[in-house]
Image: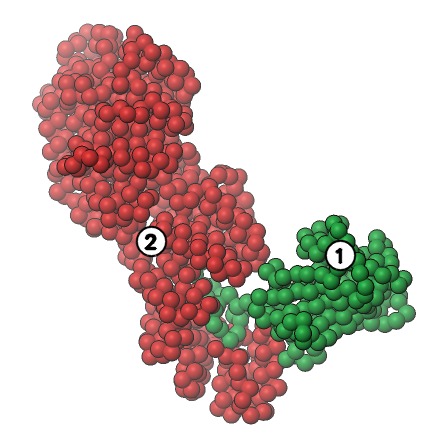
Amino acid sequence: METLMVDRIHSSLRLFMHRNAIFLCERLCAQFPSETNLQLLATCYLHNNQPYAAYHILKGKKLPESRYLFAMSCFRMNLLREAEDTLCPVNEPNIESSIQVPSGATGNYLLGVIYRCTGRMSAAAEQFTQALTVDPLLWAAYEELCILGVAEDADECFSEATALRLQQEHASTSALEKSNFANENRILSSSLPSSLGDIIPKQMKQLHANITAEVPGYHHVRGTALHVQNSTTSNIVQFDTPSPATAQTSSIVPPPLFRNVHAYQNTISVDAPAKQKANGANQPLRRKYLDEARLKKVSGRLFNQSSESLPRRSARLSRDTTINSNSNISQFGGNGTDHSSGKLRVNSSTPSKLCSTAIRSVQVRKGKPRATENFDEGSRNEVIDEMWTDNEPATSSSVTTDGRFFEQDKAERIMSQDSKLAVGIRELLGLLRLLGEGFRLSCLFKCQEALEVFRKLPEPQFNTGWVLCQVGKAYFELVDYLEADHYFELAHRLSPCTLDGMDIYSTVLYHLNAEMRLSYLAQELISIDRLSPQAWCAVGNCFALRKDHETALKNFQRAVQLDSRFAYAHTLCGHEYSALEDYENSLKFYQCALQVDERHYNAWYGLGVVYLRQEKFEFAEHHFRRAFQINPRSSVLMCYLGMALHSLKRNEEALEMMEKAIAADKKNPLPKYQKALILLGLQKYTEALEELERLKEIAPHESSMYALMGKIYKQLNILDKAVFCFGIALDLKPPAADLAIIKAAMEKVHLPDELMDDDL
Amino acid sequence: MESDAEEETSATPTAGRLKGSPELTVDADMREMAKTAAWSVSSCKAGNGVAALRDDNLDTYWQSDGAQPHLVNIQFQKKVQLQLVVLYVDFKLDESYTPSKISIRAGDGFHNLKEIKTVELAKPVGWVHISLSGADPRETFIHTFMLQIAVLSNHLNGRDTHVRQIKIFGPRPNPVPRQPFHFISREFITYSTIR
């Protein structure tokens, strides 16, 4: 009865029947109280968004999986201290994370996130690196490292050596595959992306005992492929399944997956189950077959992408894989589109990506390895199955079914399986390498290089929400707003539910003064997800564009409330306070943003501006310099740094900085203008004039430029030109404050010099 | 510009009296300046105090309760540039409580206020825009620490006065710090800040 219940619970979870699952699980725990059942119940609660319930039942439990689930519940409830203590007990010497930290790589990842949220960046970086070592396909860990600015080259992380390692691990596992048929079946399914839902519950159920005993092979397979180290997860439930035959037949509903014949394995059909069906009678043979098939399937699945493979799960478990995978993904994604939430970035990207890409293809862009472990908590990904291939045609779903499998020699299969595995691993790593390198470079603001790397991606991968948003972001950092606009628009069109980069997109539209489009975007985002901070940031930007700073502020504050770990919302609040001249509050908000993400150069910049206005030039220079150190390519930052230096009267350095800014971006008129200002201050009138003449070509309709020229001519006593320039400046309709100054200046042209004031 | 309102001469026999308009029209390059200022009044009736002048609600009003002239004092935290004062009054509702002659004074504090403008109103209904600019372009703004709006007399010789809302406008600060002039062209504005 126990196994039956467990099975039903898993399938309920898989199909999002949370209340059903919880009910059955509670009955299960009452009837067969055991820690593994409690874990299953906790998973059900976590799926149902009741982390407090999971917290309550798992409090004090010691098994690694329980600790992991408990930590996850604590994290969801924002009890970071407890979560940390559970994952990394204070009094136990932290020898080896794989032992100490439950759930292996994902445990390290969670611990890393907790460290980051509590401000311990180096410890966080350590944990993420550890997670990556344990499981090189754990993209989220690499992503976090990039954000912290300490990621090593993607080539290192996703290198040949890693490929070999993965391969070896996998290979060794396959040798052991002789485990319980049922388990394997399950396992396989779990490995299938779609099966995620399925498997996880099962796995959860199971638990340690079974793991090693049962399907060592499977476990390994999964583990190696994904480095899923969670022992629990590997426990494929040890279902006391009724005779294998039954299981088999039932499970055999071969999913149609195999259509996808990707390069990976044509012969090895994942459809072992299918085959099995065919061979109903031959149990032992089938079992072996299954093992292999599963193995292949697993590997195939891991490395191939095919929607087909997804559904592979055994009939019993088979469900609509796509649904599962999708659901899994979205589940993982943490409730929908809001990936940006600081919480578990774990799958943040994936869900969105998944949504955008064809569901069928389990194309995990980021290769989420998290797989089973995460599953434990229900929310994590199922990754395992995300396979992902670089090129569609290239990989074949291992699932290519075909009866031939049966006929093949087992050894042969294993070998070809291995080679396919190798190919698959390499492909996956290749893709991850590109994406990782691109992301790393863009986090280090080496935008040009990042763009080049991203361009190397194959078409289908490139044309997905995440990549396009990254490309847009890179252009944004390069202050090329038109290109950024283009890419963001494309991204939004291709995957309207990706909210991740939309806050930057709204800023791009703000800079381009595209009021209509910005308000349209904001409305759209709100209608997609009212609870996402990006949507409110877009709305706020709309109001800010119209200079209604108070309403903008209100909206940004809403965004902050929705997710206090979203640094950009804090920065935008700071900008609005600054516009309202409430400098105290703006400082506060900029500092909040920096607490969340120290490498958020916009906040450093904001602080610099406030200090500049308050005439605390030393502070201003310091903060601009910090921003500049983080993003050394931004010509605007260089310009501001130069302005601060000029205010400090360090004119030589200021001029140098302006030269750099001019060189960095020819289209930016501001550094040239500032250079002219500095030269004016140094009384180098002719050079200043030259600069302004050059500037005229770029920005012919700028009244401030003519006004400045007028001033310089006045200094040089070329009065007719001065009046002429002032006249042009007036014609260009400057705002009232400038009008007054310019008119006054015009009248004073014929008077002696003492009134050339109002300048800096 | 707002000064046009002053030249309004409709049906009233005396030219130059302000009538008030139903809309509050202010240039985009101006903004409300007195949110962080200290507001006080010379006298008020209970329940109709100074807060009614700033609550953005045209149904609530300040009612004075003493001798004329009735004063509204606005003290800023630092010297500011001001350009426009706008009051909302309604003759139809307030009749003899509606101000008819208003004097605006500016200075550093109570001790050195100097009158800068006087206006007369003729049965005004709506927003009355009072520009503080002089004729000279150099005098577009007044730089002051304090502004005082004095109601010297009311319509129909009423003793006390009702004013429903007061707003003070000045120029927007330059979004780019430490610049002599504002930027107006797209090219400059796009590159002028980081958001």
Is B108 or A341 nearer to us in this picture? B108
Q: Is residue A731 left or right of residue A372?
A: right
Q: Which residue is mark 2?
A: A598
* Amino acid type shown at disc 2: Glu
Residues at marks 2 and 1 touching, judged by CB atoms closer than 8 Å: no
In the rendered image, which quarter contains the N terminus of chain B? bottom right
Chain of the residue where label 2 is placed in the rendered structure:
A
Q: Which residue occupies 17% across, 48% down?
A: A156
Q: Position of residue A218 (x, y in %)?
A: 18, 23
Q: Which residue is mark 1?
A: B44
Q: Position of residue B63 (x, y in %)?
A: 78, 56
- Mark 2 Cα-neighbour bin, 10 Å: few <14, some 14–19, many ≥20: some
Task: Answer yes or no: is residue B169 visible.
Answer: yes
Q: Give the image quarter of residue A393.
A: top left
Cα distance in 3D space between marks 2 and 1: 52 Å
Q: Give the image quarter of residue A251.
A: top left
Q: Colour of chain A?
A: red
Q: Give the image quarter of residue A258.
A: top left
Q: Colour of chain B?
A: green
Depicted A410 relative to depicted B103: above or below: above
